[in-house]
Amino acid sequence: MIAAVLSLVTMAPVSAQGLLKHIERVTPRIAQRGTTVEVTIQGGWLKEPREVIFSTPGLRAIEIEPLPSLQPPITLAHGGRIEDQMKCRFEIAADCPAGEHQFRIRTADQLSTLATFHVSPFPVVDASDVPHHTIATALPVPLNVTIRQNRSADGLHLFKVPAAPGTRLTAEVEAVRLADVHYGDSEFDLALRILDANGRELAANDDNPLHLQDPFICLKLPNHLPGDSVYVEVGPSVAGQGNVLYCLHVGSFSRPLAVFPPGGPSGKPLQAKLLGDPMGDVDQAIAVPDVPGTFAQFGDAPSPLLLRSSPFPNVLEEREATDTRISSLPVALNGVLDKPGDTDAFRLSVKQGDRYRVRVYSAALGSPLDPAIRIRPVTAQGLPGPAVAEADDADPLLTDREIFGPNFRSRGGLKDAIDPSIVWESKADGDYLIEVRDTNGFGAPTAVYRIEIETPPDRIYAHLTTGGNSDWVESTRYMGLAVPQGNRWTVNLNLPQGQGNTYRGGLQIIAQGLPPGVKLVSPPAPPGQTRWPVQLVTDPFAEPQGAVVAFSVLATDPDKSIESGFQQWVPFINHSGGDAWRAVRSDRAIMAITDRASITIDLVRPTIALVRGGELAIAVKLARRAGYNESVDFQCEFAPQGVGLPPAETISGSATEATLRITAEQNAPLGAGPLFVRATTLPQGSGELGAGRVMVSSEIITITVADPFVELASQPTSIRRGAQGRFTFSVSHKTPFNGQTTARLLGLPKGVNVLEPLPVITVDSKVIVFEIEATEESLLGAVNGIGCELTVKVAGQEIRQRAGNGTLRIDPKL
């Protein structure tokens, strides 16, 4: 190991690779449950694949092996590329839930960006390459299958389906939901039609409340059909480029549009009615999960309906009553706005100061409503009074829906954006009406809604953010959880509050699901922190493996109890600026122990405090594996509030030492807080978001921000060109120090010089005086921001402090 002092520290180079991802293409995208399918995965930095880690049960990968790299690589938008590839076999359990499943790949030294794979309840077949763009050339397919198809620039595809008069036919397209591209456009917006043998349109769909841009049709076929087949046509909704992979589910399966009531008490059976299927509504008993939240209810369709599990009873609207009485709170109100212009009202009694969260679930569950709510007191005459609270859409950032992560304009295509949620505190005892309506006056038999009313729980989330970039894009540098054997890796978790949270105390972050040989290190977060570091540390001989983990928080106050949860969001079909069409949410994260890294990084713990207005130098020690002499980036990623951090720097060649210089603002909060640095290898062709780079971190050390050694004050001073004068500061001592320090004057304008000797400050100094002169070249006028720099040596370490904020005016020569 080389102990030479760092010879060159430079700014970290900006990678030419741009927004490089590990996984850019998964083929095929969908397969039937209960089968095993060979899968090819392509992207970058996938050499030496070791494990595919799914975040949910039901799938596992076997027979993993690398494939030859593509030469030349396929270039993609924003610097992405496809170069490496691998294959494996996905074993899909017979009871694997249908729909989307998330996974990451562990290689020898990487944990990949997120990818997805879909599971169908039906046999999956690939569409023929033979053109099938007309009724005459339509591709024959049986009922109850999933067809994998690539839509190229030729546009339409037609499929010939067996049909019997009076029976149900359902066709459902997955294109946006199936997409695994990180940058795309309107080519994923498809449309669907069903035609008879004469080309007459029987039904059509483009967008819909259940799946947004992905169309579906469920119809009862006419009693009279020409022939024994109908034709399913899939084509572009708007003009767009080709090469869009989609799948078409087609069959006789039921496709209800809504469930009423759209939720029930947790852990209890719910007697519900499935609404909207063309063959009629169906009564069904639904098992509501024990855990509160939104859950998926699958029938025989390939996609579910969403319902709510809540720890309180249901109240159903009384359709013939002016309003529905609520006997107790908390409660879940359930109704249908079944006619245009319909408004439902529920009446409840509250006390002054009662505080409730009133949250609507309608569009978020796939209902066609754009709901609005209004709370009105009931007057002494029994009439509705003026509104005391009302809301239409969710907050633009979706924080009132307790959704943290989807960014920029479309919020990741989330339907939750139009469901309101408010916290209401009653100003007086009495009866109140909660009214719900559609903002456009819409009504339909499937326009269900649910309003959950409860005292807001104290809840704080752990949110693993995608990272800092002008686009909303996944970055393993910020949200990756790969930890080399015998090393450390640290990420920053956001700690957003749930709507109506009142807990303001300290927090302790914990993790569930860590594999053997991994421990979590995170100091308690003091009150008021919204972002905090979490470190994963592996034993030297921990077995390389993947694991599914979740973070949450506890109150450090033993007398307080709070609820918590974990969120992570990754965008797909993104656009420049981060306007993603869809976002994948997970309440668990995937981590991995990787092979031993070529580097470790440490900080020498400072023996002194960083003073306000000061600069502190911290020694950085880089240990290299024998023979590893490549450049390494390092950067401080977290420090106490008010502490300024330098940009990334590069330790070049075989050097093993550097210096981290941090500064404190003049008003930085006093006290101690955590600080760490990350070190990153810089292999050729790696991405600035982390793909291809091995990343480790230092221990989390504690930095203390203290009062400055001195405070300096001055009166405005003037000097004439060609003259000499004095600039004086009064000295107030804040933090004692031994010995003396020389003061240096900063910020003088051109043509004004300081004359030696420079003044010194000791513990007895009351004032310091600088002798100055103004030359003939000095610029006339006032100059602000003149201060001093002091270098004080304490406990063997030097710390710089800047103080003072004076004004000097240069006047003309007499």
Image (tube, rainbow, N blue to C red):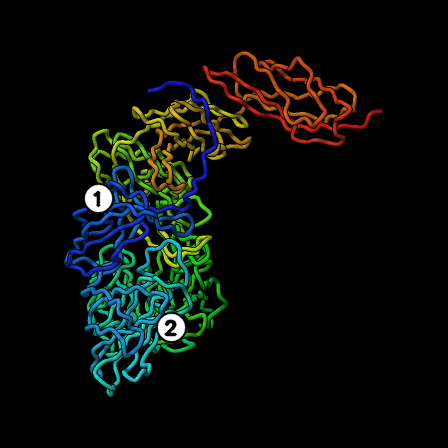
Quadrant of the image occupied by residue 237? bottom left
Q: Please state if 47 lies on the left or on the right of 653 as rendered.
A: left
Give the residue number, with chain letter if any, for mark 1. Answer: 51
- Disc 1 or disc 2, which is closer to the eye? 1
Where does residue 588 sit, x and y in percent of width and height? 28, 48
Query: Which residue sits furthest right?
Result: 814
Report the front residue among 593 and 39. 39
Report the front residue among 796 and 338. 796
Where does residue 418 sit, x and y in percent of width and height? 42, 63
Give the residue number, with chain letter if any, for mark 2. Answer: 323
Residue 328 visible from this viewpoint: no
Query: Which residue sits furthest bottom?
Result: 224
Where does residue 393 sit, x and y in percent of width and height? 44, 62
Query: Which residue sits furthest front?
Result: 71
Tell me the SS state at disc 1: strand
Q: What type is the residue that disc 2 sits on?
A: Asp
- Residue for point 51% across, 21% down: 799
Q: What type is the residue that disc 1 sits on?
A: Glu
